[in-house]
Image: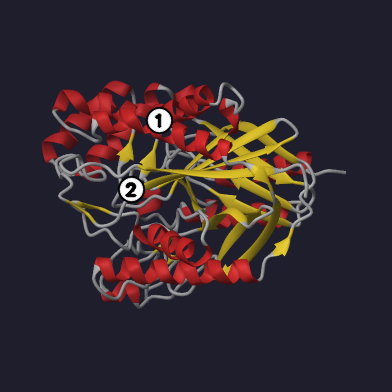
């Protein structure tokens, strides 16, 4: 056994009926398909503690993200510093999108992005899960494996017969489903922590938009395929599984949907579970060594924002039009424009275990190519890359994607300039290089 200790905890964070649907503003939740959870992990080694939380949410931005990290730091008496708290959302499009900043902007229009009582309770629930995880921490060994996942992810930006890039969203028509799969990462990575009497829990990372359950703006709640996969794995292996969304900015379920939203959500969850089970069965034990946590903050160059007054006029026009997509795209842009110097700073976090294993957490909806570049450039034997640790920066495309256009570039949810995603990936590799033991 190493000095490393690990523990897991969980809280139910299912939103109540009658509260706003994901990005729906005027659409309220009428049904709960399956519960939403916050699954927490605490890792400790030589006095250093790290908190990792996987949340069944669509988005967690800026002030809301910070409020939960602060609650975790307070609840642990400062034993887990603010910078050592990672909050990853699964990005289920059938779960809440939380932004206290955006809610404040929308409130004068009579619009609700989130339920205020739900949003206020969430930091305490997550903090309770982390305290539970800390109380359950035990000495562990670490193993890591990868397993192939069939027919869940496909690239959201395939080329059509004319060679033009198109946007293949979560549940598209047959002509978009027939286009090639494109570049994906076909594997789920699983990091398992095993104590004296059995596994304490596992962290799994897979890159794909959780959109198999969503049809338009759904009036129901679902953790989507990550939730169903997690449930199946916990029934099989008898310990908690924490799901982290990977670099899924250009990855989605659109090619492989075949039945109803419910049928596809269950089927894709089963495929994820089979891949993760294979990863566990073929996992190798890691020479964990001493755990380290590192962070770097990279100011990104963004496209010029119009004056805030102009953005506010655009917001008024979008509200008058009534379509939630343009409303939220402009509203989130107002949030960034008002706090530009602060919110353009990308927080990159890494946790390393000796020379063998690194886990990286990136902000935003990062394109898969950046995650693959980090993995290829890392000096660690195995590197697992997650994203969605604060959605504020939205899409982080590749340089090559910009002239191709389409939703992830031109849909109003992209702020960075060409090349900044590559610069962020290079900075993550530099962070890892400085953390590898000699």
Image quarter in which the C terminus is found: top right
Q: Which residue is mark 2?
A: 411
Please provide percent x and percent y for residue 303.
45, 35
Q: Is residue 156 above or below residue 427?
A: below
Tell me if residue 433 can be seen.
yes
Q: Which residue is mark 1?
A: 123
Please provide percent x and percent y for residue 384.
63, 54
Helix or strand or loop: what does disc 1 sit on?
Answer: helix
Q: Residue furthest toward the front?
A: 197
Q: Is residue 242 left or right of residue 36?
A: right
Helix or strand or loop: what does disc 2 sit on?
Answer: loop
Alpha-carbon span between mark 2 and mark 1:
31 Å
Q: Is residue 422 above or below residue 302?
A: below
Tell me if residue 305 can be seen.
no
The image quadrant that residue 121 belongs to is top left
Please provide percent x and percent y for residue 164.
39, 67
Q: Residues within 10 Å of mark 2 (few under 14, many from 20)?
A: few
């Amino acid at each position: 056994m190493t000095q490393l200790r690990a523990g897991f905890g969980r809280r139910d964070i299912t939103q109540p009926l009658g509260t706003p649907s994901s990005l729906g503003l005027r659409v309220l939740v009428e049904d709960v398909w399956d519960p939403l959870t916050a699954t927490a992990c605490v890792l400790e080694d030589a006095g250093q503690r790290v908190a990792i939380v996987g949340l069944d949410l669509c988005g967690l931005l800026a002030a809301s993200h910070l409020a939960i990290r602060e609650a975790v730091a307070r609840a642990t008496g400062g034993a887990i510093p603010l910078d050592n708290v990672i909050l990853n959302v699964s990005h289920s499009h059938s779960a809440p999108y939380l932004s206290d900043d955006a809610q404040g902007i929308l409130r004068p229009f009579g619009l609700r992005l989130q339920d205020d009582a739900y949003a206020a309770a969430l930091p305490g629930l997550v903090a309770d899960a982390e305290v539970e995880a800390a109380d359950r921490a035990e000495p562990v060994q670490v193993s890591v494996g990868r397993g192939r996942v069939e027919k869940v992810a496909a690239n959201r930006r395939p080329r059509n017969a004319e060679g033009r890039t198109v946007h293949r969203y979560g549940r598209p028509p047959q002509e978009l489903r027939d286009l090639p799969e494109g570049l994906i990462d076909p594997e789920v990575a699983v990091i398992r922590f095993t104590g004296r009497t059995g596994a304490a829990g596992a962290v799994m990372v897979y890159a794909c938009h959780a959109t198999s359950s969503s049809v338009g703006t759904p009036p129901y709640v679902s953790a989507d395929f990550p939730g169903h996969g997690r449930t199946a794995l916990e029934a099989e292996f008898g310990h908690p599984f924490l799901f982290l969304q990977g670099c899924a900015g250009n990855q989605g379920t659109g090619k492989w949907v075949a039945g109803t939203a419910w049928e596809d959500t269950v089927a894709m969850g089963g495929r994820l579970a089979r891949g993760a089970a294979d990863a566990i069965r073929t996992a190798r034990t890691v020479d964990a060594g001493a755990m380290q946590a590192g962070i770097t903050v990279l100011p990104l160059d963004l496209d010029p924002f119009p004056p805030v007054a102009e953005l506010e006029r655009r917001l008024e026009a979008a509200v008058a039009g009534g379509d939630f997509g343009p409303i939220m795209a402009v509203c989130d842009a107002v949030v960034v424009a008002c706090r530009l110097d602060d919110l353009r700073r990308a927080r990159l976090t890494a946790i390393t275990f000796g020379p063998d294993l690194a886990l990286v957490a990136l902000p935003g909806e990062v394109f898969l190519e950046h995650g693959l570049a980090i993995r290829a450039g890392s000096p660690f034997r195995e590197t697992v890359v997650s994203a969605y640790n604060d959605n504020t920066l939205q899409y982080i495309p590749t340089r090559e994607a910009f002239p191709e256009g389409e939703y992830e570039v031109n849909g109003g949810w992209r702020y960075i300039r060409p090349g900044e995603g590559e610069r962020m990936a290079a900075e993550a590799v530099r962070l890892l290089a400085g953390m590898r033991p000699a």
